Image (cartoon, rainbow, N blue to C red):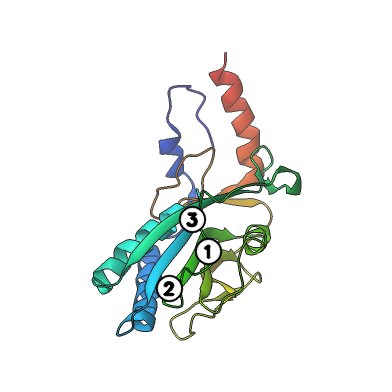
Amino acid sequence: MFNNNKNKSLEDNFYKCTKSVSESEVIDLVESLATKIASMVEDTNLSIRIISILKGGDFFSTFLIQKLKLKLPNTKIKKEGITVSLYDKETLTVSSNKINVELNGCLMRPQSDQELLFILDDLYDTGSTMNYVKKHLTNSSKIIYLTLFGFLGSLSVADQEQPLIMNKCMCLRLIPNSGDLWYVGCGLDLDEEHRDKPELRFVIKNHYLLNKKLYLNNYNK
């Protein structure tokens, strides 16, 4: 996965990963979601507040807001961010012993009856992140939980025919999870690289972890 040349950027390695969801597919997914949200909000006095779970959810929320502003030019749309960290970066697994939450001053409920609140993340994996976030939320009928991706069998898909369901986590696209795969792009990263890539690719987790150590050893020589 990594080149032994310590001056070689991880940028090149992104394109050696296998493509899973193309840029055009990601655009279509977010465009469809924006259209659905616009249909819920247009001709109402509702405002929209989007809380992004950082850092992964920032790609999704930024992209979605761009689409929403085009469709709802007269609607107030506000973006905020909270930090929930559950992953052990050494093993790429969820670690309940390393939970870190920063609300960054966000009010975790709709500010009024006229506000629709969205909680956005990049990936629904075990559900630990969303479940932890819900502990900080006040119950409301106007909160929608959405992730850009979710593992097969983990949750339902917010497709074009299905309405968005309040207080239930949904995703835009289901992807396979064999336990050996790790995804990059669309908010997902490898050592903080590739988050901003507009397409999803996957790598073999064990291959990455092995070569990460080799890369770092060579880099530090």
Amino acid type at mark 3? Gly
Query: Tag 3's secondary structure?
Result: helix
Q: In which quarter of the image is residue 150?
A: bottom right
Mark 3 surroundings within 10 Å by alpha-carbon count, few (fewer than 14), some (14 through 19), many (20 or more): many
Choose the circle earlier in sequence order: 3 or 1. 3
* Quarter containing the N terminus: top right
| Front of the two marks 2 and 3 | 2
Mark 2 vs mark 1, CA separation in Å: 25 Å
Q: Where is residue 126 in the image (x, y as percent from the top left)?
A: 68, 60
Q: Residue at x 44, y 73 (%)?
A: 116
**Residue 105, horizontal then vertical, whole percent:** 51, 51
Check residue 115 in the rendering and tell me which mark sits there, or answer none.
Answer: 2
Per the rendering, the mark at residue 57 is: 3
For badge 1, the amino acid type reads Phe
> Gap in Å between the C-alphas at discs 3 and 1?
11 Å
Q: Which residue has dot 1 on it?
A: 149
